[in-house]
Image (cartoon, helix red, strand yellow):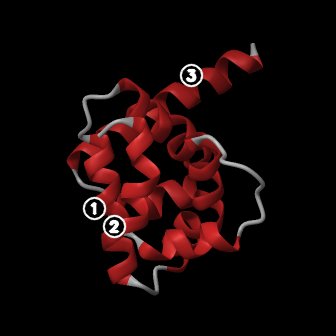
Amino acid sequence: MPTTEVIPTLFRAVPESKHSYDAWEMPGDPLPYIVFGFLDESLFTPAVMSGDNPELLQRIFDFLERMASSRSVEVLNLMLVGLFEPWSENPTVLSKARDHMRPATEALASQAAEKFTRHKLGERR
């Protein structure tokens, strides 16, 4: 899936993401990184933390698995920067999210968490 298709594909796979996006008052046509970050804050993380909508979580993580299985470096970077780096900052979110991850998503999340930890350790030196 090319990066330009990520957001439209997400809207089809998880219609709630389109509703969140439509309620967002962002002028113009923001880049996928901006949209993905917004949807993480407004939909993905709240869904993971509440855990009260298993069907929504399944659709979100099915979509994330599809992204994580992509051969596009840009799509994988979108996941790393737009989702897994923020989740790596909050161990509770990452831990709860791991309960729903499939293999490719788990591998990418682990890679992001490792990278984030190394980066944080480097800042302390």
Q: Quadrant of the N terminus?
A: top left
Q: Which residue is mark 1?
A: 62
Residue at 52 percent of width and 65 percent of height = 44
Say which amino acid is labelled 2: Ala
Residue at 32 percent of width and 70 percent of height = 59
Q: Which residue is mark 3?
A: 118
Q: Earlier in the sequence, mark 3 or mark 2?
A: 2
16 is higher (above) or lower (below) than 62: below
Give the percent coordinates (x, y) of residue 11. 43, 65
Tell whether label 1 touches label 2 (CB within 8 Å).
Answer: yes
Assess disc 2: are there few (<14), some (14-19) or many (≥20) residues with their C-alpha within 10 Å of its C-alpha: some
Q: Earlier in the sequence, mark 2 or mark 1?
A: 2
Give the percent coordinates (x, y) of residue 46. 59, 72
- C-alpha distance separating marks 3 and 2: 34 Å
- C-alpha distance separating marks 2 and 1: 8 Å
Residue at 57 percent of width and 29 percent of height = 117
Q: Which residue is mark 2?
A: 13
